[in-house]
């Protein structure tokens, strides 16, 4: 320590300033990466986490409300579809409805489209249906039975066309139904 004091006092003021500056610079170069940068990194990390928590806190009520609505809707759908017969072929069900409920005049045409398999248990089948009916009431009864009957189907597209010269109503539908494939 004595030698350090002797070295310091033997220097002129200009050398002392340069040595002091060099000492401060060296201290900063050692302290900055060892102490200051980790502290800054911790504050930045904490700020990001706080922003994430704040976002979660503000979004959580909306997410929980939507989840509750979806769960209630799921229960309603499960209750509705618990009595649905998915073992029967939707094509034959659709053709029976066309004959019995729609009382389709003339010929009707049901064209199967490519469907998809759902979870290994069910197949989602799509159909294009074309028929003619003389009564709007028969078409309404058909649509009611199609969407709410023993094997409800989903209507994704409907076109109704009545020519001014005839009383026949041309109906085109795109419908989809479900069929169990677990037993096949």
Image (spheres, helix red, strand yellow):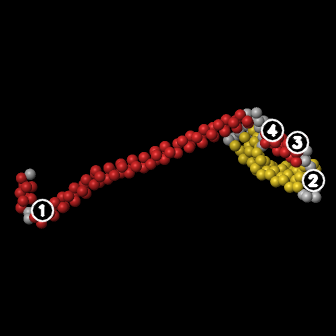
The residue that mark 3 highlights is 101
Q: CA distance from mark 3 to mark 1?
A: 106 Å
* Structural distance between the alpha carbons of marks 1 and 4: 98 Å
Residue 34 showing in the rendered view: yes
Check contact, mark 2 vs mark 3: CB within 8 A: no
Circle nearer the N terminus (3, 1): 1
Which residue was labeled with disc 2? 167
Residue position marked by numbered label 4 in the rendering: 149
Q: Residue at x 46, y 45 (%)?
A: 53
Q: Nearer the viewer, mark 3 or mark 1?
A: 3
First reached walking from the N terminus: tag 1 or tag 4: 1
Mark 3 touches mark 1? (CB < 8 Å): no
Q: Residue furthest bottom?
A: 14
Residue 122 placement (x, y as % from top left)? 72, 40
Q: Is residue 144 left or right of residue 34?
A: right
Disc 1 on helix, strand or loop?
helix
User: Closer to us: mark 2 or mark 4?
Assistant: 2
Secondary structure type for disc 3:
loop
What is the C-alpha distance between the residues marked 4 and 3?
11 Å
Which of pointers 1 and 4 indicates the residue nearer the eye? 4
Front-lying residue, 36 or 119: 36
Spatial CA distance of label 2 from label 3 is 18 Å
In this view, the mark in front (2 or 1):
2
Left/right of residue 58 with respect to residue 86 in the rendered view: left
């Amino acid at each position: 320590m004595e030698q350090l004091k002797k070295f310091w006092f033997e220097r002129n003021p200009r050398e002392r300033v340069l040595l002091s500056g060099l000492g401060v610079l060296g201290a900063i170069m050692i302290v900055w990466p060892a102490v200051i940068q980790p502290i800054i990194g911790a504050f930045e990390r904490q700020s990001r986490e706080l922003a994430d928590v704040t976002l979660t806190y503000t979004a959580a009520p909306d997410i929980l409300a939507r989840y509750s609505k979806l769960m209630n809707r799921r229960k309603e759908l499960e209750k509705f579809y618990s009595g649905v017969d998915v073992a029967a072929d939707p094509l034959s069900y659709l053709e029976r409805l066309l004959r019995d409920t729609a009382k389709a005049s003339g010929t009707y045409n049901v064209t199967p489209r490519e469907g998809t398999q759902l979870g290994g248990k069910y197949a989602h089948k799509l159909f294009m249906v074309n028929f003619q009916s003389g009564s709007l009431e028969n078409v309404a009864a058909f649509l009611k039975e199609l969407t709410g009957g023993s094997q409800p189907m989903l209507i994704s597209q409907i076109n109704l066309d009545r020519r001014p010269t005839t009383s026949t109503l041309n109906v085109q539908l795109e419908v989809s139904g479900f069929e169990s494939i677990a037993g096949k």
